[in-house]
Each structure stands twice: as C-alpha cells, then as structure tokens.
Amino acid sequence: MKARKHKRGVVRHFKVLLLLVLLYLCGTVGYYFLPWTVRKPVYMLSPKLNRTLRLKGFKIVEGWDGLGLWGRDCRAAVEPGHRGDHAYGGYPACGRELTLLENEGYVVGYSEPLRNPLWVAYRVFDVPSLESGKRPGFRTDHRTRAKVSQRDYSGSGYDRGHMAPNYAIATRYGSDGQRETFLMSNIVPQTPQINRHIWKDLEMRVAKRYGRYFDEVWVVTGPIFNEPVGRRLSSGVAIPSAYYKIMIDEKGGQLRVKAFLIAGNCPPYTRIKTRLVSIDDLEVLTGLDFFPDLSKDVQSALESKPAGRLWPWLGSALRHH
C-alpha cells in the first residue's frame, strides 16, 4: 500500500513538473510572437532588473556578464587601470605615421596616404533608452590633409561604411556624438553586401545586446589593405581587402576578447561565428599592435587563439524583429 502511494506521489509530482515546464515553454514561445510594443518594456527592463537582483545579494543571478567568462573565450586576469574612455589597454600602436583624431564618442588613427582610418576605437555602455535621432549628412573632416568628401564615393558602387557606428554612438553620446560619426575620417569603402548585412549585424550586437547586458564593451575596428595598395576609388581613396572588429569586455579583473575578420567579398548572411580569428592574425594583417599597454603575458593569453564561440546573450527571446 505504501509503495503504491509513493508511486502515485512520484507520478503526481512528475505531472506537476511537466505541466510547469510546458507552461514555461508556451509562455516563452508565446512571448516571442507578441508585438514589439509589448515586448519592448521587458527588453529595456531586463538588464536593470538583473543588476538589481545581484546588488540585493542574489549571487546566483550573475547574468551573462559572469556566465560569459566561462567556457572557451580568450580571457586573462588583468590589473586595474587599463580602462579608457574609448580604448582599453591603450591605442593601437602602428609603425606608420597616423593622425590621431579625438571625438566625443570615439577616437581615430587616420592614414593620410590611404585616405582611410586604420583603426577606430569606441566604448558602448548601458543606457536607459536606445532611441537615436535622425541621421545627419556626411561631412569632410578638415582636421585631415586628405579632406575626403562624400562626393569622393559617388558612383563608385561602394557604400560609405561607418567604423564608429552611427547607432551605437548616437544612443550613448546624443546628437553631437552622432554627427561626428558622419565625418569622412570615420568612413571606409564597403560593398553593400558587407555594409548592410554582416557588418551591420556585428554593430547591432554591440549596441543593442553587449553594451546593455555586459554593462560596457570596448571595440577596436578598421579596414585591412593588401600591400602594396593597388585598388582605389577614382578619387584616390584606398579600397580595403577586408575589415576587422575586436570586442573587449572586463568584469571583476577578468578580461575577455573576441575578434572577427570579414573579407571584402564575404557573402551576405554569412554565419558570424565562422569569422572568428585570433588577434595575432589581425596584427599580422594590419601591422598594428593591439592593447600595447597590457603586459606581454596578458597579450599572449588574449591574442594567440581565436575565441571558440560568440558571447551568449540573455535576451535572445526579446529581440526586436
């Protein structure tokens, strides 16, 4: 008799558990198909709620900021003091002469002979709102000798590709910062299939996801040129053969990075994970030394191998489709 009662109790608990799992799955799937106007308040609240729970002592609620430090990331322990307003671990070092252009929301290492930035560094961080203003027009940067104008790209077949992205900077630094992203010193030639697909996806991952769920993320990005540089627009602007983007995240003295190499002929809708490379590879291709202020041991730990995965993100069910 006791055995039968115990068995019935186990079955009853199993059914309750199964019902709860089904309700959770139905709620998750149903939520995913709700209109964005309904999902948006939850999307905006999630990072703040997650951090509030951590501050209240719920140690299990570490969010992806802590969870992301597990697994196959390229990571290392780092001493404090390497955080900059726009760059982590110092500006990239370069053997060639560059013009340093400092803006409110980002910094540029600009090559006058190539009429392109060789690196652009910026930082995104969590903000209450992800609203941005109307896109302004492109402007010549008169701090440069090259003085590239938007007309230099006209009829070329290439998009004016932002390195410091309009959306990420606009949502963090407002309209003044947004206008600076339309300086031509922040622009490189990109084919539409790159600029409007995989490059845009990478930018939005940082702006909408990582910057909010990881509190802050630093980015270094730019073009890659074959040497000697043979391909140029009719205006003399050098055409890159590829593009790179490095993302840096620090939490509690632990630093992690991941780097991407996007070929100039990369097909649209390419899986981003297949573009992960090591920073050492990018240093060979670009001639830049990334994170020069970090110790050699930290650089070796971060740069010698590609990250094994994309960073996870808490809000996969909350995306704006």
Image (cartoon, rainbow, N blue to C red):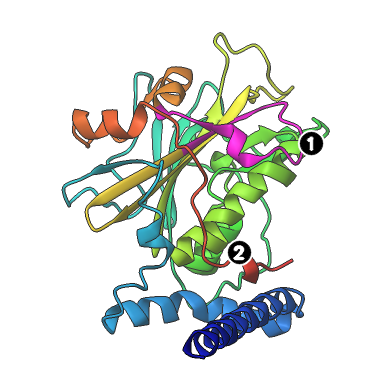
- Residue at numbered disc 1: 154
- Residue 195 is situated, as x and y percent measured from the top left of the image, at 70, 42
Q: Does residue 90 lie above or below 80 as drawn?
A: above
As for residue 57 lying within the magenta part, the answer is: no
User: Are dots 1 and 2 in contact, CB under 8 Å?
Assistant: no
Q: Nearer the viewer, residue 290 or 70?
A: 70
Q: Nearer the viewer, residue 274 or 167?
A: 274
As for residue 277 lying within the magenta part, the answer is: yes
Q: Which residues are magenta?
A: 259-279
Residue 33 in which image quadrant: bottom right
Q: Does residue 36 lie above or below 2 as drawn?
A: above
- Residue 56 is situated, as x and y percent measured from the top left of the image, at 28, 84
Q: Does residue 186 lie above or below 56 as drawn?
A: above
The residue type indicated by label 2 comes to: Ser
Residue 64 in which image quadrant: bottom left
Q: Name the residue at the front extreme.
A: 1
Tell me if residue 26 can be seen: yes
- Residue at numbered disc 2: 316
- Residue 308 is situated, as x and y percent measured from the top left of the image, at 47, 37
* Sequence-first tag of 1 and 2: 1
The residue type indicated by label 1 comes to: Ser
Label 1, label 2: how many angstroms apart (C-alpha)? 38 Å
* Residue in view at x 79 percent, y 36 percent: 154
- Residue 310 is situated, as x and y percent measured from the top left of the image, at 52, 46
